Image (cartoon, grey):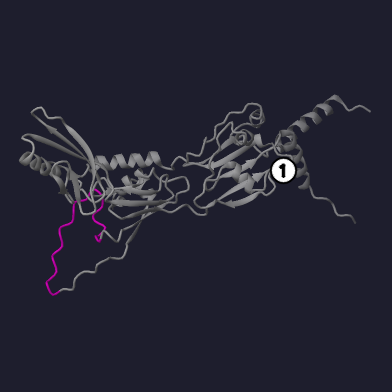
Amino acid sequence: MRLPRVWLKATLASALATLLLTGCSYQDFKKPLVRNYAADLFYRPERPMGEEGVAVDTEALAAALARWKRQYPAEEIPYKVGKRDVLRIVINVTGGAESSALEVPVAEDGTITTPLIGGVQVLGLTSKEIENLLAERYQGDYYRNAVVNVYVMRYESQTFYVTGAVMKPGVVPLTRPRLSLLEALMSSGGPSLDAGDSVVVTRGTSAQQAPGPKAGESEAPAPTPPPASAAPPPVQVAPESIRVSLRELIELSDMSRNIWIGPGDVVHVPPATPNTFLVLGYVNGPGMYTLPRGEKLGLLDAVAMAHGITSHARSENSCLLRRTKDERELYKVDLTRIASGEEPDTRVVPGDVIIVGTSWPIRSVDGIIGAGRLVPIPAVP
């Protein structure tokens, strides 16, 4: 007995609708269903390529720093030369003598060694003061008209430290007597993708000074000296930690949070917690995993932590769900091209969701099986 043509059409339409509605193991819900299936035929890598790890708020950090510089012009505090700094000295002599240039380090005793005049004490002097000192020495004994120019080539005497969830952690030289917190963060490349919502500044014990005024404020008046009978201050002071909200500092441009950073200070950006990511889809061990501290983990490493892909997986039909500043973005990922070296891997950051896909026929069959499990089976009497 043949089914009526209307019933046949209705059956085919229902089957097609079932395939479309149940094959949703991987799709972008912002697009029509047909486009998600068609996406299997046209691959276009739209994900963040490589492991450059673009900082979270680099543009916002630069904008906040520009606003601060417009509001508070750069300080006119000359840099004073210290131990281990490297100076470039250019000597110009009129009257036919040739010019000479040399680079000399500042020794531990604060002296530099120059031609003809030997050792010269420069510790605590500015470049201008060293120029005048050397010109006076040369003109007095060796040259009639000597013009000396002194530049600091490398700043090694005064440094601070940037640690934690930043793009370039490490030791940062101080090119001025002090920097603002925004400048310190910018010098390290800004907060990384796994940065938390605050930064902790710990004052160096070697500085033995109060935190100082906030960037842009005037210097506080000198304190009244204690009486002679007062006990001397301690040799060292306990470190002081100041926590600053990155949102208030960068997004809200609260310049009262833009404190000064001095020699020996530690700028620490704690990473966001929890430091986890998800691996879902056609893998042998789907679930939540923890990012190893201090290590760079790629998408292939993340899938390996989930015990690899299943026999029904189509690794070229995978996707990455990443939280951006405003919302979550879904990127298509071809793990096969990454494994073969045709594309660079992408660094996994906290909060990422990696979904290993499969082909649309298997998605449809799995969807039908899954839908069938939702139908209650009547109990046998």
Q: Indicate the position of residue 133 as horizontal and vertical percent values.
A: 11, 44
Q: Amino acid at mark 1?
A: Thr
Seen as rendered, the residue at the extreme right is 1
User: Position of 342 compared to 191: left or right?
Assistant: right
Residue visible at 78% across and 32% down? 15
Find the magenta span and give its range.
208-229
Q: Quadrant of the C terminus?
A: bottom right
Picture layout, residue 117 above or below residue 146: below
- At label 1, counting other C-alpha atoms closer than 10 Å, the crowd grade (few under 14, some 14-19, many 20 or more) is some
Picture layout, residue 218 above or below residue 334: below
Q: Indicate the position of residue 184 as horizontal and vertical percent values.
A: 33, 47
Nearest to the observer: residue 18 or residue 118: 118
Q: Indicate the position of residue 210 as horizontal and vertical percent values.
A: 25, 60
Residue 211 in the magenta stretch? The answer is yes
Can I make out residue 318 in this image? yes
Circle 1 — which element? loop
Can I make out residue 76 in this image? no
Residue 136 in the magenta stretch? The answer is no
Seen as rendered, the residue at the extreme front is 116
Q: Quadrant of residue 24?
A: top right
User: Position of 295 compared to 206: left or right?
Assistant: right
Seen as rendered, the residue at the extreme bottom is 229
